[in-house]
Image: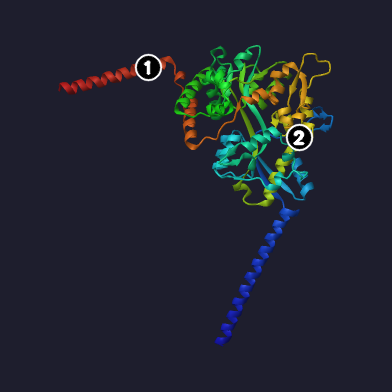
Amino acid sequence: MTMRKNKAGRCQEVRTLLLAVFSFFLFLSASFAAEAAEGTGGEKEVTLRVCSWEEYIDLGGWDEEDTIDLDSGDIIGERSMVEDFTDWYYETYGIRVKVEYSTFGTNEDLYNMLTLGDTYDLVCPSEYMIMKLMTEGRLVPLSKDFFDETDKNNYYIKGVSPYIRAVFEDNEIEGRPWSDYAAGYMWGITGIVYNPELVSREDASSWRILNNPDYYRQITIKDNVRDSYFAAVGAIKSDLLTSEEFLKDPDYQKNLEREMNDTSEETIARVQAYLQDVKNNAYSFETDSGKADMVTGKVAANYQWSGDSVYTMDQADEDGLKLAFAVPEEATNIYFDGWVMLKDGINGSAAKQHVAEAFINFNSRADNAIRNMYYIGYTSVISGGEDRRIFEYADWCYGAEEDDEDVMEYDLGYFFSDEDENKGEYVITAPSDQADRQLFSQYPSEEVISRSSLMDCFDENQMQAINQMWINVRCYNIYDIPVWVWIIVGAVTGILLAAGGKRLWGKYKG
């Protein structure tokens, strides 16, 4: 009896063990099946969480008159880019995709969102934030397949501007080039949008305009620490940056970036004093309202990103107001926004990474790059490679009419080709006033590019010092305190000192 009971118990243990092993193999089979479905065309849906700038992708809904009629064919955004992507991905790879698209307002907002636990697979920060995320080890490198130029669907690597490609390959963080982790999206420079009837081109061509009393309460400045710091450095170092000795130094570009990213105690103190003057002089610190303030005539000049300057001038043109764009002679910030994949989001999923890279490629297809440029006003990093539609679009936007007499030749060869013999093919005959308007803003001249500087990724101590400076500027300004307050403070201080002195004298006599 005992023997049978023990034997039954052992049989039960064997059955339990076999069941466990069987269940384990079922689990593995299901896992492999799921992975296969994700990677080879099964019906399992992949969710891609994207976070980018506000109003930074074509949302569709174009009217028929918005059609871009190029020689190569018409382009129109009927549906959103996200909707078109999900259909294209299913048609191309046989996998359903759900895109959860979110937005942020500034690079710092995005970083705070990530710090607080928000999870995304693909984000589109600016170059200095890309550098910061690389330094912190938060990014997933782009796959080798992404750089395969024989893959017809790899529109990015086949179409990115040779100039932009060189920038991403030549700039490194801790020995790793940007191009290993980031794919460019839009790029541009910073400068001053101004009303030429109220502001001279000479004044608009210096960062010193921001605290120029001739434009008291008529100019706006960016309400973020990095852009405002850059402009302030340009202003306080204007004499140095424009000196003949500095400009002719063989190491000019290296010296320029060093000076524009100077975070010494002395420079930070001078920047704070300058920005406090600006705060007292400017109409406002703003992030987005400056565009409308220029169009409605509330201000005469606006510190602006080149993409927003195109939008501002376009809107002003509709109201019969002609605005212009100037690049400060001291230096301009050349910025890049790029797509990067986050480790916390991708989390080792090959299927999710494939979708993320496909999203980058789809937005890099020439017609889609044009749609995004047309919709948001910024300049795509895509030149198109052998696909000439990007250049056709630039000519469609800014080329002169046949009966225009006051025209100029505007050379875009540096952006569209890295072969000298082909650069002559990329010259636009444009109205002469485009030398300081939309064309100049959309595609800066090679001369302007030569005096451009990147923003460095500052370390924790540098950012702490700069952020404290910014707090001092934005939250407290000694110049804002009215005279009558100082009189009262002085009187009260005098009374308290007198009363304290009497008490001390009384104790001394006693």
In this view, the residue in front, 362 or 501, is 362
Residue 437: x %, y % from top left: 70, 20
Question: Which is more foreground, mark 2 or mark 1?
Answer: 2
- Sequence order check, earlier mark of 2 and 1: 2
Mark 1: few, some, or many residues within 10 Å (few <14, many ≥20)?
A: few
Determine which residue is flagged by label 2: 384
In this view, the residue in front, 354 or 451, is 451
In this view, the residue in front, 276 or 297, is 276
Kindly state the secondary structure of the residue where label 2 is placed: loop
The reply to whether residue 279 is visible in this rendering is yes
Residue 74: x %, y % from top left: 83, 32
Q: Quadrant of residue 510?
A: top left
Residue most toward the front?
250
Residue 161: x %, y % from top left: 71, 34
In this view, the residue in front, 217 or 123, is 123
Kindly state the secondary structure of the residue where label 1 is placed: helix
Distance (Cα) linking label 2 and label 1: 67 Å
The reply to whether residue 299 is visible in this rendering is no
Residue 379 lies, with reference to residue 492, above or below; the image says below
Determine which residue is flagged by label 1: 488
